[in-house]
Amino acid sequence: MALIGYARVSSIGQSLELQVAALEEAGCYPIFAEKKSGRSASDREQLALALDYIRDKQDTLIVTRLDRLARSVIDLHQIIARVTAKDAAFRVLQQSGIDTSTSTGKLTMAVLAAVAEFETDIRAERQRDGINAAKANGVYQGRKPTVDAAGIKAALAAGERPAALAKRLGVARSTVYRLAG
């Protein structure tokens, strides 16, 4: 029987130490840890290795908090499907009700995952509302243009080829075509 730990933080400035210590205290070995965004599970190398390491129904994948594993219900269910396909279990240390070896644990996990995704959506909606309000008040105007559209039109009118102009300005050809049109 193996207790397999997985720890994740989103940014380089954050520390994995607390998660790793909690997983070690719970008896996890090995522990897979990485500094990657949790928005998508598809590009997390250590998570993939942890899931591949699970061998049979005696193994349990353990994380400290549910949001360390997945930020969306879809990703969470896909990850848990991979775990259960191997007849293994999944457990969360700080949310002790989440343990897929029990029916109640499965229900608790599904409810908490849905709430977490709802909170993420609400946060993004508030952010969009704030940006729209700032734009309406003239406070937020977006990024300043890095290329002068009139300059591009003049260079093209003078006979400069779009590819050469894009290379000279350090932009994509599609930018030249978009600003020329």
Image: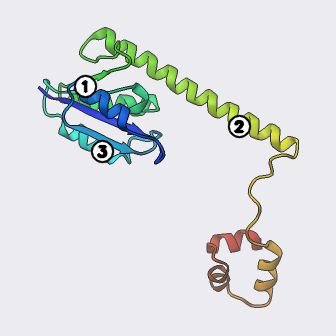
**Residue at image mark 1:** 25
Q: Quadrant of the N terminus?
A: top left
Q: Is mark 2 on a helix, strand or loop?
A: helix
Question: Between 6 and 133, which is closer to the camera in this rendering?
Answer: 6
How packed is label 3: few (under 14 Cα within 10 Å), some, or many (20 or more)? some
Q: Which amino acid does label 3 sit on?
A: Gln
Q: Residue at x 65, y 79 (%)?
A: 166
Q: Residue at x 77, y 61 (%)?
A: 144
Spot occupied by residue 90 in the image (x, y as percentages of width and height) = 27, 24
Side of 108 where 84 appears, left or right: left
Spot occupied by residue 139 in the image (x, y as percentages of width and height) = 84, 46
Work out whether 181 lies above or below 41. Answer: below
Q: Which colour scheme is used?
A: rainbow
- Residue closest to the far bottom: 159
Side of 28 where 112 appears, left or right: right
Q: Which amino acid does label 1 sit on?
A: Glu
Q: Residue at x 44, y 28 (%)?
A: 73
Q: How far apart are marks 1 and 3 (CA)?
A: 20 Å
Are dots 1 and 2 in contact, CB under 8 Å?
no
**Residue at image mark 3:** 46
Q: What element carries label 3?
A: helix
Upstream in sequence: badge 2 or badge 3: 3
Work out whether 174 lies above or below 57. Answer: below
**Residue at image mark 2:** 128
Q: How far apart are marks 1 and 2 (CA)?
A: 41 Å
Q: Which of marks 2 and 3 is in front?
A: 3
Q: Quadrant of the C terminus?
A: bottom right
Q: What residue type is labelled 2?
A: Arg
Q: How far apart are marks 2 and 3 (CA)?
A: 32 Å
Upstream in sequence: badge 1 or badge 3: 1
Q: Is mark 1 on a helix, strand or loop?
A: helix
The quadrant holding residue 50 is top left
